[in-house]
Amino acid sequence: MTSTHPPSSAPRPAGFGLVLVLGLAAMVVSMMQTLVVPILGVIQRDLDTSTSGVSWVTTATLLSAAVFTPLLGRFGDQHGKKPTLVGVLVLLAAGSVLAATTDSLSLLILARVLQGAATAIFPLALSVLREEIPHERLHTAMALVSGTLAFGSGLALVGAGLLTQGAHPDYHRVFWLACGLAVLALIGVLLVVPASRHRTGGRTDWLGAAALAAMLVLLLLPISQGHEWGWTSGRTLGLFAGSAATAVVWVLIERRVREPMVDMRMFVHRPVLFTNIAGLLVGFAMFAQFLGVSYLVQMPEELTGYGFGASVLRASVEYLLPTTLVSLVAAQFGGMLVSRIGARMTLVAGAAFGVTGFAWLTLQHDSTPDVILAGMVVGVAISFGYAAMPALIAAGVPHHQSGIANGINSISRSVGSAVASAVITSLLASKTIQHLPAGAPPLPEESQFTLSFVLAGGAFLLVALAALVGLATTRRAGGQEAHAVSGAATGSVPATGAGSVPEAVAEQAPAR
C-alpha cells in the first residue's frame, strides 16, 4: 500500500524533548495499570461494594486496553500518530476527571474503561520515535521510553499510598493526580510531537477489529475473574472456549479482507511471533515480582513465621521503588547494548538477570536487603527486555505496520501480567497456614511464595530460549544475513506488506 505521505530519506532532527514527552506519556500509561492497586480496599469501603464488584475497577482497564490498543495502533498507522496520541490523551484525561468526581461504582468502571485506552499510547510513542529519531540514537531512545513503564508502575504505587494516608483516606485524590499528569502529557504532545509523515490511509477493518476485541475480552475476562468464579466453572471454561472459537473466526476474516487490521503474515513472521511470546513471558515475570514481593513483605511475621509486617506504603517505597528506579537507569544501558550486541542478545542478557534475581528471591527472602537487591536485579532484567523488544519489532516490520505490531506486543505483555495476577493469586489462596488465631484472615504458606518466584524465574528461562532458538538469525545461501536491522529501523525496507519484511532481523551485528 502506498503511503499518502512518502517517507523522506532521513528522519527529521529530533532532540531530547521529544523523548522526554513520549517518556512522560508512556509513564502515564503504566501508572493506569497499578494506580488503583493500593486503594482497592478504600474504594470498596467508600462505595459499599463487594470484593468481586471492586475487582472490576482493575478488570475494566485490562479489557479496555485489549480492545483499544491494537485498534488505535492501526488507526495511528493509517491516519497519523500525533492526532491519535492527542485523542487518546483526551480520553485519559476525561476518564481521570470522571473517576475523581464520582461516587458511583458504575461510573468509576466507565472511567477506568476510558483510562484503559491509554495503553495505546506506548505503541504509538514507539512509532513516533521510529519515524523521527535518527537510527544511531533510535535504540537508546526506545529503551528510555520503555524504561518509563516500570518507573511509572512504581510511582503510581508510591503516589497512591501517600495520597491516601491518614485516618480518612480519599481515593479521589489519586485520580486527580492521574488527571494532572494526563493533561501535562497532552500539552507536551501538542507542543513537541511533529505531525506524522507516514500515513497509509485506507479503510479501517472494523469487522477484524471487532473479532480481535471479542477474542481478547473472552480470553482476559476468565483469566482475571477465574479465581472468583472458579477455574473449572462453566462460565470460565465457556469463555475460554469462546475465545478459541473467536480466534479462528478472526484469522479467517483477516485472511479474506483486502485491508486487514493485522496482516497474518506479519503476525506469524518469526521475529514478530517470538518477540510477542517473549513479551508475554516478561509481562508474567514482572507482575509476579510485583505481586509476590508486595504480598510477601506485608505478611505478619508473628503469625506466619516469615514476612516483615510492612504497610502498603512501606512495601511500595522500601521494597518496590528501588526496582523501578533501577529499571529507569538500566534502560539507558539497555539501549546501548542493543546498539552494540544486538536486540536478541540484549534480551538474552535480560533473561539471565531475571533468572538470577528470581533464584535469589527463591532461595533467600528472609531479610530486607535480600528482597530489595534481588528485586533490583529483576528490575535490570525487565529494563533490558523492554529495551530489546521494541527494537526487535522495529526490525521485523515496515513503517506502515509499526503501530499495530507494537500494539500487539503491548497486548502480549498485558496478557502475561493478567495471567501472572491470576496464577499468583490462586497459588497464594490454595495453601494457607493452619492453626492461625481465631479471627485471623487466611494467610498463605511460605512455600507458595517460593513457588511463585520459581515460576517467574522459569518464565525468564523461556525468554532466553525464545531469543536463542526462536529468534536465531536465519541466513541465506552464501552465509549473508537477509537484512540488517538498521535498514528496517530507518524505513529502507520497502513498505509493500509483510512479504517484504526481512527474514532475519532478530539480531543486529555490532557496527563495523
Image (spheres, rainbow, N blue to C red):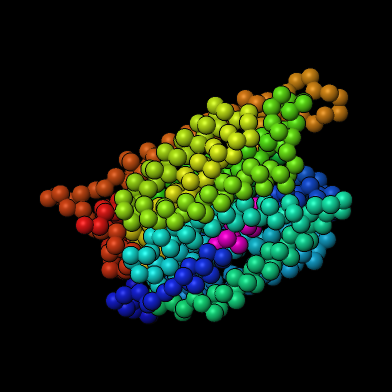
Q: Position of residue 229 (x, y in %)?
A: 70, 39
In this rendering, is residue 323 above or below 100?
above
Judge from the rendering whether residue 179 lies leftward or rightward of residue 186; answer left or right.
right
The answer to which quarter of the image holds residue 447 is top right
The image quadrant where one finds the N terminus is: bottom left
Residue at position x 56%, y 51% in the image:
325
Residue at position x 80%, y 52% in the image:
165
Is 31 inside the magenta-drawn segment? yes
Q: Which residues are magenta?
A: 26-35
Q: Position of residue 276 (x, y in %)?
A: 43, 50
- Classified by dominant secondary structure, the portion drawn in magenta counts as helix
Is 425 inside the magenta-drawn segment? no
Residue at position x 47%, y 51% in the image:
330
Q: How many marks?
A: 0
Q: Residue furthest left?
A: 478
The image quadrant where one finds the C terminus is: bottom left
Q: Position of residue 126 (x, y in %)?
A: 45, 64
Judge from the rendering whether residue 58 lies leftward or rightward of residue 470; answer left or right.
right
In this rendering, is residue 290 above or below 98?
above
Residue 64 in view of the camera:
no
Residue at position x 69%, y 31% in the image:
307
Q: Position of residue 110 (x, y in %)?
A: 71, 62
Q: Residue furthest front?
A: 369
In this rendering, is residue 21 above or below 364?
below
In this rendering, is residue 472 above or below 264?
above
Q: Please tell me which residue lies in front, 171 or 399.
A: 171
